[in-house]
Image (tube, rainbow, N blue to C red):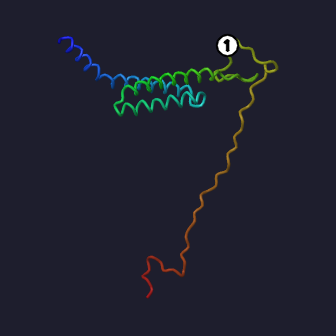
Amino acid sequence: MQRLLVLAALVFASSGCGGAISSVYIIQGQLALAGARSANAETLAPYEFTSADAYLRKAREAHSYADFEHSLRFARLATVRAQQAKKKALDQNKPLELPPGDVPPGGPPSGAQPPPGQAGEPPPPPPVIQEAPVQPPVIIRKVPDPQSPSPQAPPRQ
């Protein structure tokens, strides 16, 4: 009899944890999707990103119906897809190669030699920006119509 009570207590205690566990996996899926979004996976890995987003939506929907088993399954799938999207996006997001003669934004790397033909040349002057002339504002005044009665004058009889 004691075994039956212990087993019943374990089943009862474990049945209430489904919502908490699926909530944790949904949050992990959200974090993984945010990481994929920061790696620009929306454009570089659209299939994986879109499927991760769809699985996460389904996980939330199942969680709202207290279907924690399916919620957990969809949340895990969303996390896996988001991680795949992030990895694929990072693999495709290689640094841009600059054409010869261009300097990276932080300046040339230490010990780098200038390209041939540019060793002693001064930098080109900055481009001159010509501003368009500013025209004064135009004031349009309404001229009263002699045919219509003015709002200040009493109406004609």
Quadrant of image for the C terminus: bottom left
Picture residue at 79% right of the left edge, 21% below the top:
118
State which quadrant residue 86 falls in.
top right
State which quadrant residue 153 falls in.
bottom left
Question: Is label 1 in a helix, a strand or a loop?
Answer: loop
Going by the picture, which residue comes out furthest to the front?
1
In front here: 137 or 70?
70
Picture residue at 21% right of the left edge, 14% below the top:
4
In front here: 77 or 44?
77
Going by the picture, which residue comes out furthest to the left?
1
Is 21 left, or right, of 74 in this rendering?
Answer: left
Whether residue 127 is situated above or below residue 45 in the rendered picture: below
Quadrant of image for the N terminus: top left
Residue 84 x %, y %: 54, 22
Picture residue at 47% right of the left edge, 29% below the top:
55
Label 1 crowd bin: few (<14), some (14–19), many (20+), radius 10 Å: few
Give the residue number, with chain letter if any, for mark 1: 110
Q: Amino acid at mark 1?
A: Ser
Whether residue 156 is situated above or below residue 35 in the rendered picture: below
Is 36 left, or right, of 27 in this rendering?
Answer: right
Going by the picture, which residue comes out furthest to the right?
117
In front here: 120 or 44?
44
Residue 116 x %, y %: 81, 18
State which quadrant residue 121 falls in.
top right
In front here: 64 or 7?
7
Residue 8 x %, y %: 23, 17
Picture residue at 40% right of the left edge, 24% below the top:
72
Q: How many marks?
A: 1
